[in-house]
Amino acid sequence: MDFNLDPKHQMIKEVCRKFADNEVETIAAEIDETERFPLETIEKMGKLGLMGISIPKEYGGAGAGYTGFAIAIEEISKSCATTSVILVAHTSLCASMIYNSGNKEQKQKYLVPLAKGEKLGAFGLTEPNAGSDASNQQTTAVLNGDHYLLNGSKIFITNGAHADTYVITAMTDTSKGLRGISAFIIEKGWEGFSFGPPENKMGIRGSSTTELIFQDIKVPKENLIGKEGQGFKMAMMTLDAGRIVVAAQALGIAEAALEESIKYVKERIQFKKPLSKQQIIQFMIADMATEVENGRNLVYKSAWLKDNGKSFGISSSMAKLYCSEMASRVTNKAIQLHGGYGYIKDYKVERLMRDARITEIYEGTSEIQRTVISSSILK
Amino acid sequence: MKIIVCIKQVPDTNEVKIDPKTNTLIREGVPSIINPDDKAAIEEALKIKDKQGAEVTVLTMGPPQAEYALREGLAMGADKGILLSSRSFAGSDTWATSLALSGGIKKIGNYDLIFCGRQAIDGDTAQVGPEIAEHLDLPQITYVSKIRSINKEKAVVERALEDGYEVIEVTLPAVFTIIKESNNPRYPNIGRIIDVFDNMSIDVWDEIMIKLESEKLGLKGSPTQVLRTFTPPIKAPGKMIEGNTDKEKVLNLLNNLYNNIVK
């Protein structure tokens, strides 16, 4: 057993750290405050190889697997969760779904430009009445000669208005529930495809979250991913791995909160000594550090399982469940340690706490993760 | 065009802490990095490669773990990495180091340019580059801040001075020492990192392969004698002389000098 990063992952970590310090941290507070989508960072991430980090080289990716992917997301999230969620939605959902389930032509046409960072991707599963209950999808795709006619809408879609390529699900057979769901690739600019206004969010405010509206969109038959009725299964397979990087995102946010807290408690003088000399503060730091370490072990183990072709679904659910709730606890404590200053936007922990909260909700809520974990144990 | 870049793996001095009891560097757990001036030298070579094509070789002398620094150079875009590593090299001062590197450079052969960083952040000697030029009997330009033009025969470069720069034309081959202010080194591409570790190998050469006798290398071949090492004393902070007018400030200064020094 070896808990050390191997040298190539160590180098990926160092490069991502430097990149995040120089290119991401510098604008993080600004894009949060102004809700600005950081297009310039996406271009830089493409050049670095981040946009296709887990996608094999033959499709234009970096071939760094999920260990490399998780490390990159962890490092970027320490600086800015807005930036990391753009990458998570693009790579772990949109590009990975095409990689996992698309055919040769779809991979050449759509996956390669996504992996190279030339196009931005989004993934649409959630609907107003189909959140955790994906079987209640209202969006329909009806076969009509050489194309499907797509009608309905998706909500809370990350990269919504800024993406070029969208992987979405729709009912091709409303009588079959989950087995009636199919997945399609659609492109921005197609007739009948429009967007709702951007959501005004609590956290990850620089990311774009919008509704996708489909009105009689003609989707060519060849843009069906896999076969009719396989959409839900393929989406779940993609989300299983996606949980590793959402967990890594939560981990990165928590690590940043811990780092900020350590710095602060050493500097802040109360009762004529630094806060770090008070036992109650020391114990809070100890608890936060222990939780972060726990989370990191879960994330890296899940990534290792995935990269080594082992079953990782339960591990990734545990990582996602634990890290997201841990990030909320740790960022909450970080604010407590900062006292009144922690409640002010001038301090990074304020943003970290708002950003942490969403990780308990998206890509499968904590409740869904508990369902997944317990049903595999108690079956 | 063939460019050889000599680099050194150093402890990241931003992360180094001093043991207050022994006054020595705590090296444990300190990350190793490519010396910043050397990284700028790699970038300068890669800029030439991007513009007009060049084969870039990164060369270092060090323990086996220095391979990591070479791989970082490869990940940035260098074509080959060569590590000079042997027990005979241990304890080398700048003279023995430059001799070994010159031996490596001779074995590589057919070079047009040798790049070094100005100086290393752990030793600060700035001697290895110039010494390589002497061993190889090549012209040298130190403190290069910009390469204006370059072809197979000659180069025109700017050499940084304290209050400006010199423009120098030099015939090739030549040795340049590069300053870190000359550029912003690129980030290694992540796909390239994977390639470098999965598909590329580093050549490791010892003293026999570079045709040097072990007596001339390492501690034995090092004329430098270290008398003592010490932490520079911390200077007292400066004092601002206050006053409403210039005359008052001068009077206060004189009073200060008289009371604190003369009296």
Image (cartoon, coloured by chain):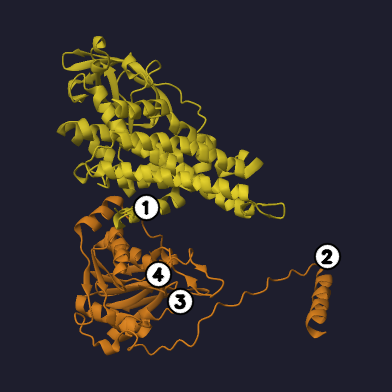
Type of amino acid at the residue the image marks with label 3? Asp
Contact? badges 1 and 2 (CB < 8 Å): no
Q: How crowded is mark 3: few (under 14 residues within 10 Å), some or many (20 or more)?
A: few
Disc marking residue B244: 2
Chain letter for the residue marked with disc 2 in the picture: B
Give left or right: position of A360 versus B134.
right
Task: Confirm whether residue B71 shows in the render.
Answer: yes
Contact? badges 3 and 4 (CB < 8 Å): no
Instruction: From the image, tell me which residue sits under label 1.
Output: A13
**Mark 3 vs mark 4: same chain?**
yes
Tell me the SS state at disc 3: loop
Q: Where is residue A158 in the image (x, y as percent from the top left)?
A: 39, 30
Q: How far apart are marks 3 and 4 (CA)?
A: 11 Å
With respect to residue A1, does A195 lie above or below?
Answer: above
Type of amino acid at the residue the image marks with label 1? Lys
Tell me the SS state at disc 1: helix
Q: Which quadrant holds the C terminus of chain A?
A: top left
Instruction: From the image, tell me which residue sits under label 3.
Output: B124
